[in-house]
Image: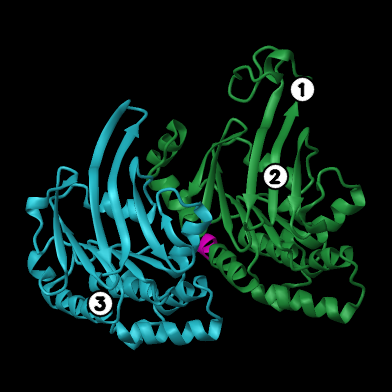
Amino acid sequence: MEKPVLRIDHLTVRYGKTCGYCRNGGKLNKNTCPHCKTVWACNDVNVSLYEGEILGIVGESGSGKSTLMKSLYFDFGITEGRGYLKDFHDGEEDIFSQSLQQKKYIKNHIMGMVYQNPVLGLRMDYSSAGNIAEKLIAAGNRNFRKMNERVTELLDAMEILQSRKKEPPKNFSGGMQQRVQISKALANNPKILLLDEVTTGLDLSVQARVLELIRKIHQEFHISIMLVSHDLAVIRMLADRTIVMLDGKIIEQGLTDQILDDPQQPYTQQLVHSLL
Amino acid sequence: MEKILEIKGLSKEFYLHEQQRKIKSCRDISFSLNKGGFIGIVGASGAGKSTVLRCIYRTYLATAGSVIYDSLSYGKLDLVKAEERQIIHLRKVEIGYVSQFLTILPRTTAKQHVINGALDAGFSYEESVKKAEEMLRYFRLSENLWDIYPNTFSGGEKLRLNLAHAMVKAPRLLLLDEPTASLDNDTKLLVKELLMKLKAEGTSMIGIFHDLEFMEGLCDHVYNISQGSFRPEQEVS
């Protein structure tokens, strides 16, 4: 049996005190308890990501996609659940119950994250090279020459001119900022890349360039990718499997073309039929 | 004769939640494909031809029945119930699907598209480039088109690119979903010649075509599908 590189069991993120009604599985108003108003941002989510796979995540705004991604990257504390990484103690230890130091290790060595909003992933006043170097230093690198070589290599791969590596990302266009973010996320050769709406808000030609880079990264580094997107065409082109989220829960999952061409759930059918 | 695919009682119905109704697409389809064989499926539009092919490829979830595929990787496997990871693997290395439409990542050249197919199947980059060039030549796609984005290709060129992309993985089973629908006669003849060549080399194929003449000498069996089911008396040999 193939072991996933990442396995999440029963992940729940909720905001509020909860009551007997919602704790016992009472019907929620979307993701909110009608009695105690607790918000169940992620509700009993189970996900497996396999080696070299691209897993697409789709769903409407507020369905819990970004909460799931940010929880995995330890940006949000979770309420319940467990997570296992194949490259962390051979998948035997729960990552959510680790110390802050261990979580930092995971963020710096095993996972990379690219946010929809580059402000969350970059220091806008540092140089682009400095942003990437920060990630390298966090992983224990101290040799300036080696770090400089790695920065050059990454910026080249992301098609950012070397002449601009000393400029801060605030001077860059949205597409360039995303590419610097991707370089930073890839700095320490992570096994898993989390991409949260990376092409949203970019014009078509820049979007095409970012998609091409994602495909290239996936092929060259053979890393596993979790890709959140509103754009079903992007999901169709890149994802092997897709999960559909609604009101904090996974309501459907399957092969990407099956989800998009033969959706089973009412919401998924609605989503697919809304395609232009 | 050894069978590569055996389909028994395959049915597919779609349930549309918004309209709260079921649409029956194909019913109780049974047939088998010998290794190296070629089965053609004909029928009117909406008869359920593509549904059968998509159920085999698992783009559609079959409502009932089984699709037993004799795979190299897992032995005999029911594609209806196989795990998603197994289907992904089989699609990468054993089962190819070709339609008249080209789905390609933006800013990807024709050659890179075929290289990507080989990389997916697990070949190294150097091997993939070599195989892609071989395939593009095999399917007679002019060399000056290799480094061009295929959006501007003609229907015939797109189809040959699709075939090259599918065949670079050397699949054992090739599913052809109306690949010749929009082609002129000359291009159809070229495609027929290429499919004959693939068949002679041992690729097992199932194809949907509108043109009975096209299938002459190519298919071992032709089934006529009508209102979602095969009628034995309509089998054309």
User: What residue would you read off at disc 1?
Assistant: A16
Q: Residue at x 35, y 53 (%)?
A: B67
Please name whichever residue, B216 or A118, is drawn nearer the observer in this view of the structure. Answer: B216
Can you tell which chain is drawn cyan?
B
Label disc, if present, on residue B94 of the rendered structure: none
Helix, strand or loop under label 2: strand
Q: Position of residue A23 (x, y in %)?
A: 71, 20
Callout 3: 10 Å neighbours few (<14), some, many (20+)? some
Image location (x, y in percent) of residue A152: 75, 78
First in sequence: mark 1 vs mark 2 = 2
Q: Kindly identify which residue carries mark 2.
A: A8
Decide which of B27, B126 is in the foreground and name it: B27
The one of B8 and A135 positioned closer to us in this rendering = B8
What chain is tagged by disc 2? A
Q: Position of residue A178 (x, y in %)?
A: 65, 59
Residue A192, picture quadrant: bottom right
Which numbered tag is attached to residue B199? 3
- Quarter of image, res A157: bottom right
